[in-house]
């Protein structure tokens, strides 16, 4: 399903980044529970406007309840609770409609993210960067990241130059292996061999 129709004053942002999913209703007045995709959900708290898309598999009865839901959602309040977030949205005062929101994918503008500290990066900014080693050998392209507890791991994919098969490399995203991240050059330099 495409995003909900936008009001005349709103456009789907070109830099929209998916950051969370609605997991159900919260409270009796239309609040919602949200599961952020990041352990640090500051992107959700950095703006009072969340864009949404309904999942393909949403039941027809829920889809009908969402017909009047605004795009973007206007956030009255949001706070962390346990391992998730609870939020009250303007124009959503009905628990049944809040429950119908279960499964909504939430997006925010990348331009509204808080500024990252020196040496810190948002995962979304690392996806698609080329990775080379100290010998300028191409290791591949970052296709994702995994959280392994103490640190993140870059998932890097490339094609084997001999067989054409897809290769996946997992490189810990820590100072011991990452020499440099250049967002302007869209490149990461790593201390990692082709056969590691």
Image (tube, rainbow, N blue to C red):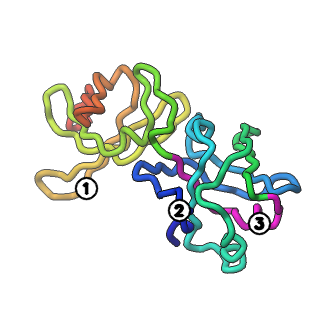
Query: In terms of depth relative to the viewer, which is nearer, 126 or 72?
Result: 72
Where residue 28 appears, as percent x and y from the top left, is: 88, 56
Disc 2: which residue: 8
Q: Which of label 3 and label 2 is nearer to you?
A: 2
Q: In which quarter of the image is the C terminus?
A: top left
Instruction: Tell me if I can see residue 35 in this picture.
Output: yes
**In whole angstroms, how far apart are the C-alphas of marks 3 and 1?**
44 Å
Q: Magenta span covers which residues?
A: 93-108
Residue drawn where x is 24% and y is 44% of the image: 140
Residue 23, picture quadrant: bottom right
Whether residue 39 can be seen here: no
Determine the CA span between mark 2 and mark 1.
45 Å
Locate residue 19 relative to residue 194 in the image: left or right.
right
Q: What element carries label 1?
A: strand
Determine whether 70 is above or below 74 in the image.
below
Find out whether the residues at labels 2 and 1 contact each other: C-beta distance under 8 Å. no
Q: Is residue 6 above or below residue 141?
A: below
Q: Which of marks 3 and 1 is in front?
A: 3
N-terminal of the pair, mark 2 or mark 1, is 2
Image coordinates of residue 37 in percent, x first then y, are 56, 46
Q: Which residue is drawn at 59% across and 60% down?
A: 71
Measured along the vertical axis of the image, is residue 62 above or below residue 133?
A: below
Mark 3 — residue?
97
Give the Cα separation between the discs numbered 3 and 2: 23 Å
Label annotation for residue 166: 1
Tell me where residue 66 sits by quadrant: bottom right
Percent across and percent down for residue 172 are 39, 31
Mark 2 Cα shell of 10 Å, populated few (<14), some (14-19), many (≥20): few
Q: Decide whether residue 119 is among the magenta residues.
A: no
């Amino acid at each position: 399903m495409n995003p909900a129709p936008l009001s005349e004053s709103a456009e789907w942002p070109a830099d929209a980044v998916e950051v969370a999913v609605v997991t159900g209703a919260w409270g009796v007045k239309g609040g919602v529970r949200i599961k952020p995709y990041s352990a640090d959900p500051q992107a959700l708290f950095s703006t009072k406007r969340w864009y949404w898309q309904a999942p393909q598999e949403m039941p027809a009865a829920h889809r009908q309840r969402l017909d009047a839901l605004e795009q973007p959602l206007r956030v009255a309040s949001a706070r962390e609770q346990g391992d998730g977030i609870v939020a009250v949205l303007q124009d959503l005062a009905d628990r049944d409609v809040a429950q119908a929101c279960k499964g909504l994918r939430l997006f925010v503008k990348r331009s509204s993210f808080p500024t990252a500290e020196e040496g810190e990066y948002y995962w979304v900014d690392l996806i698609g960067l080329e990775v080379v080693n100290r010998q300028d050998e191409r290791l591949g392209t970052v296709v994702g990241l995994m959280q392994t507890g103490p640190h993140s791991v870059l998932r890097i994919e490339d094609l084997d130059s001999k067989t054409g098969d897809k290769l996946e490399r997992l490189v810990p995203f820590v100072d011991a292996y990452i020499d440099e991240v250049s967002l302007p050059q869209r490149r990461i330099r790593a201390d990692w061999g082709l056969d590691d």
